[in-house]
Image (cartoon, helix red, strand yellow):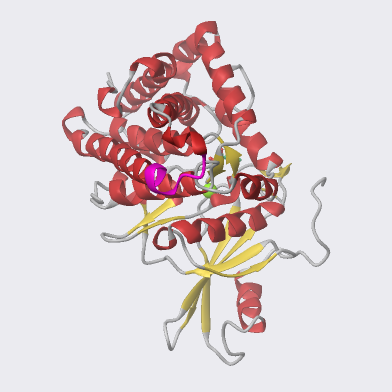
Amino acid sequence: MGVPRLEGYYELTETTAIEYAKNTGFFEQSAALDCEEIGDGNLNYVFHIVERQSGISIIIKQALPYAKVVGESWPLTLHRATIESNALNVFAKFVPDFVPKVHFTDEVLALTVMEDLSEFTILREGLIQGNRYPKIPEHIGTYLAKTLFYTSDFGLNQQEKKELAGTFINPELCKITEDLVFTDPFYDKDTNDFEEALLEDVEAIWSNDVLKLEVAKLKKKFLTQGEALLHGDLHTGSVFVTADETKVIDPEFAFYGPIGFDVGQFLANLLLNALSLPKSEQAPILDDLNQTWDVFVNTFKTLWHEHNVEPYAEVNDYLNFTLTQILQDSLGFAGCELIRRTIGLAHVKDLDGIENDEVRIAAKRQALSLGRNLILQKEHITHPRYIRLY
Ligand code: SR1
Ligand code: MG
């Protein structure tokens, strides 16, 4: 297989993960430990290790040299584990409360030992179960504004920013997004996966050159616009929550890209959840979405006025121009995310989990139509509250 592994790499099992945790000093050799592999994502192993007597626990997250969701036929760089732990460490400087603590990184085994968040719930799962998380807009809006502002040319010395960007060159993971988010769903590609009943809707997307031109422009931004250090995969499965706390996990797709990408992916995944609900139950999710945007904007404005390193920041209207651009980009990227989660390779449980066939197909059709409208109408939507789901 074509993916380089550092000599010494091996895939952990529940047994060897325990040995590793002891040999690296996280637990005494005599400790009685339980270990379970709990990873439910597309790419990695996640081992949860608990000491029976004390209850002390850790997570060992290990990258596999291939995409777990597809199998060994899709090789994938192990360097993503280093990218992920470096990104967590950068983000921890700006939002320590909103990321898990990294205890230790092992580049050879492509693993990170980190804070155990197993008391938390994955936001997507919680939302699907109908739970409410009132702190989400404040926490995610703040997370987005701070991580994106402080790693951009507005919040960071511009030479240091270039140095930092150089340490987050992440071509293989970016290629996944370039293909799975921006290209394949808009063409008749083998990676796509959609229900037969959606064929007409999908063919309408494939033959819509006006739409494809806008997607091409968004993809170009993703390819070329290194504005800030992005999480790069900020869907609701990358957020852990309790009633009071929020942790953004899994930044293995981190790279320098357009600010609106992180914002748009998060907003899109709230929209996907809203679309999975009866109309009468959508309002609270849409309120969360609007408030997340408002917190992002207000925090970004404060940072702009108080911590900007760019002399042009004082020029009238530069802030408004910047925020307008971020909103338009976010809406466009959100549109791409809605479409790819409906007909591309990687779906979301919010839609796929709707049991009634008619209701599920109707929701998916709506996701496609909303995605298309966001991409085409992004210049005319001045606030997320003007997004119309139907
Ligand atoms: C092969 S990876 C499929 C998807 O899972 C990740 O979480 C990203 O969203 C990627 O597009
Ligand atoms: Mg992930």
Whether the magenta-drawn stretch holds residue 377 is answered as no
* 208 horizontally vs 334: left or right: right
Q: Quadrant of the C terminus?
A: top left
- Residue at image point 42% right, 25% down: 321
Front position in the image: 251 or 53: 251
- Residue at image point 65% right, 46% down: 159
User: Can residue 4 be seen in this snapshot?
Assistant: yes
> Residue 80, how many percent across, how many down?
66, 52
User: Can residue 347 be seen in this snapshot?
Assistant: no
Helix, strand or loop for the magenta stretch, by majority: helix
Q: Residue furthest left?
A: 280
> Residue 381, how many percent across, how many down?
33, 19
Residues in magenta? 303-310
- Residue at image point 26% right, 53% down: 135
- Residue at image point 29% right, 23% down: 387
> Residue 167, how many percent across, how many down?
69, 50
> Residue 262, how many percent across, how many down?
47, 39
- As drawn, 152 above or below 359: below
* 127 horizontally vs 258: left or right: left
Q: How many marks?
A: 0
* 147 horizontally vs 187: left or right: left
